[in-house]
Image (cartoon, rainbow, N blue to C red):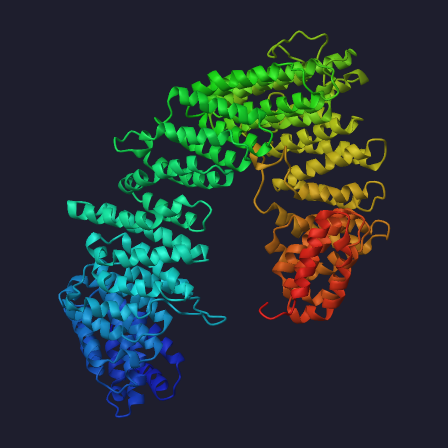
Amino acid sequence: MAAAGAGPGAGVEALAASVLDFVSGQQDGRGAEVAAGVKDGRWTVLQLVEALGFCLENTDPRMRGRGIQLLSQVLLQCYSLLQEKEVLHLVLFYESRLQDHHLVIPSVLQGLRALSMCEVLSPGLAVSVLKAIFQEVHVQSLMQLDRHTVYSIITNFMSTREEELKGLGADFTFGFIQVMDGEKDPRNLLVAFQIVRDLIAKDYSLGPFVEELFEVTSCYFPVDFTPPPNDPHGIQREDLILSLRAVLASTPQFAEFLLPLLIEKLDSELQSAKLDSLQTLTACCAIYGQKELQEFLPSLWSSLRREVFQTASEKIEAECLAALHALSACLSRSVLSSDSEDLLDSFLSSILQDCRHHLCEPDMKLVWPSAKLLQAAAGASLRTYHRITRSVLPLLLEQYTKHTQSSQRRTILEMLLGFLELQQKWGHVEEDESTLLSLQDPVCSVVFSALTDPSVQLQLVGIKALTVLGSLQGFLSSSGLELVVDHLIRLALHEEDSQSSEAAMEAAGSLAPTYPEVFSGRMVPRLEEELQSEREESYHNHRSLQQRCLQALAAVSTHTSIVRDTVPVLLQHLQKVQKGTEARNTEDMVSVCQSLHRVALQCQQDVEGCWYFHQTVVPCLLAMAVQAAMQESTHTLPGKALLEEEVLAAMIPVISAATTHLSPELAAQSVSHVVPLFLNGEVSFLPQNSFPCSFQPFGDGECLEAQRRLVALLMAFVCSLPRDVAIPQQEWLLRELLALSCSCNCPFTATTAAKCFAGLVNKHPAGQQLDEILQLAVNRMEPGLAEGPHRTQALTLLLWVTKALVLRYHPLSSCLTDKLLGLLGDTELGPTAADGFSLLMAESPDVLHKGCHADVRIMFRQRFFTDNVPKLVQGFHGAGPDVKANYLKGLSHVLNHLPKPVLVTELPTLLSLLLEALSCSDRVVQLSTLSCLHPLLLEAPQIMSLHVDTLVTKFLNLTSSPTMAVRIAALRCAHALTSLPTTVLLPYKGRVIRALAKPLDDKKRLVRKEAVAARGEWFLLGSPGR
């Protein structure tokens, strides 16, 4: 015996008592006790069988059923303990019981399921069990659970006794067909479909029963199943569809039965049946050959053509095209002999015959369906592509010349573009049989003519086609490439419509990496020439041309060799603008910086290009800024525009983007120059480094105010460094930044110093040094916040340092947040402190984000919410009437940046405060609260419907707000109200419709647009079908 030997007599008596209680007393709990006893060795299976003897031989079938139920329940727990001989006797016993009363059968099947999992099952027993089930059990008369048990027995044997079952030959397949025939329960069908897939995949013999196996599964096609509400099993219609499709598309042996079925369903009126049939056909083509398809190709093509020509459904059209693509690919794979080649050719000829002539009618509705069908077939293989383009491309080129209207030409060129894009799949255009290569001149002529057409839409298609032609290596000649570049320059610089200009720049950027020499040698010099030219034309036109030159230089900088040509041009122009005295110098400098920023972003993934850009641009920008600051200090006029906030703000992302992707070694090399520049005035690494005085941005004196502004550039650099790069003299730098942020009278300088300090603190390794510098910061902030002329600067520093610590879960963050919460009660700083909660929660664009390697922990917003919202609520209830709005504003900012799933769970406790915030006169609070409530109306309608009266009143009041953004947000919320249950909203329908009539006449178009949308939804509320 597998289990331990028999215990004392008292143990056997206890077993007998438990058996009696289970069988006669109907105490189901005893079954688990007996199973536990057998498992831990108190009793053996033999002792259990002996104890069950009286009921197994009882004439009452219910008594016998209870006895076998207990034995099966124990076996399901203890089957791994059984020995081979025990299994043999138990199998024979259970097989004999399959002829017993129908009440006994479910328990017998459970026992056989347990035995089917035994590893010591003797050879031949699996076959014996299945034969007995097939012969003695009418499976479809059983309950669902018992049918599932039969499927489980079959599955277990197929996974462990494959060779034995294959020895049954086709009898096993026939037996399973009998078992499955008539199955209706989706839970069982999923298992049954899997068994059929295994039968086919593992090469079981189907014998003469192929059609029967197909019939027993295909009767469920197409699947028509709607899961009941609150279904605990979670079976979806899609699960059954995919499982059945895997069966139907598992073997070519089903083809002669399946393809007529698919054609029949394609002709039905039911859209779901069409979609299912098309997707199944596509799946089948992966394993079919021409032999299976040959007989049905005309009917299949007829059905696919009809659906594409007539359907109004984009889904059905897409699936038809996918099926045609799969059919063409299948026939292409099967071309091994001249006969099969004839089959592919005749199929493609049918497609051409039915579709080609429609391409000659660009104004008719069948032109695009025909083009899509041809492109679907052409994209299947290189063979089909050559066959179709050989017929279609000359026709399209002829039609382009024949039709003169721009709209017609655009349609024809878009079709041509579709075929050109397919050529990209096959790489080089070198094949002797390539139609495209033989039509090189007329294709280029058509595309170039589109680029000079007055129609912007035709130009845009022409630019796309030009990009595709350029990507086909070997297609364009050197003279053709030069012509391409000339067209792109003309469109980028001189085309009036901005769409064409921007598209030309994008095209240049995508082609430049393929032909860097052509663009460097032809486009960059032309752009430089235009940029430097001093034409006698209106200032506006000249400036607009310069803007486009700058944008084009940036767009084309997509290859390192081109970057080496464009960056000096951009920097030279920036220096030229800096020396000018025109009023618009600031805007011009910002434009150059924006172009440099785009170049920096395009260089980031290329190590060589990134380092070249960094070591060329960063020192140059710093040198120009230092020169300007020196001139300001010595009261020299030129260069002053460079110190404007807008220009410095535009330079920050350039330096940041040039730094974030540096390797640690190169970053360390750069930081060893930049930090000493600001701390020690070490200017030797800067180009043109002869300055009229020393550079002391952290020095005292009003004359150094201009130099202090350049801390913004230091921030852009050091806050973008990788975390593992050591910053020289970091403690000294932090102290200088701290002092500057607390004492500087210039808000811009103080803020950038605070941000720089926060960025460094966020990345600083934990330890005593960090604790000391933070304590120093707290000691500087506290007196500054209490009184004096620099309270605002101290608050700005507090906000940024708090954010830096909140992001990294530093323990001091809670202390600083408490200080911030305390300031909400301050009448002077309270509103600014409340707005600071938005800063804490929002993504910062220049520092303290993951892109610049900041230490940002996951779910920091959720943690901040959990720790501080209760304090905000408590503070609101205890605050005086003059500062309550500050707490509401802070709360609104926190909730507005919280992930919506988290907010929905907390909604019941906070909704009353949010509704009160809508009554606040502060426009920022109103807007933030409306932005917070809008998604909640859509995602938590049941909770929001409890407050519908208040919501309707507040939203309608705010539609008359003097602030346009508030009016728009309130109308969007009024629109979102319609997602609440209709029965709740109907009493308010008339009132809302009347109130929304007023915003229809609002002076702002965007407000009127929202009012129309909202009022329309309220009008339709409660109408049939909604």
Q: Is residue 64 above or below residue 688?
A: below
**Image coords of residue 248 (percent x, y):** 28, 62
Res 906 → quadrant: bottom right
Res 810 → quadrant: top right
**Image coords of residue 223 (percent x, y):** 37, 67
Looking at the picture, tell me which residue is in the foreground, 435 or 251: 435
* Residue 171 visible in the snapshot: yes
Question: As drawn, is 98 to the left or to the right of 887?
Answer: left
Question: As drawn, is 328 to the left or to the right of 910?
Answer: left
The quadrant the C terminus occupies is bottom right
Residue ID at (21%, 52%): 290
**Image coords of residue 966 (percent x, y):** 75, 50
- Number of numbered tags placed on the structure image: 0
Res 796 → quadrant: top right
Looking at the picture, tell me which residue is in the foreground, 114 or 262: 262
Residue ID at (35%, 72%): 36
Q: Is residue 833 above or below residue 533?
A: below
Question: As drawn, is 213 to the left or to the right of 785?
Answer: left
Q: Is residue 589 above or below residue 419?
A: above
**Image coords of residue 214 (percent x, y):** 24, 67
* Residue 589 visible in the snapshot: no
Q: Residue furthest bottom?
A: 59
Question: As drawn, is 547 to the left or to the right of 285?
Answer: right
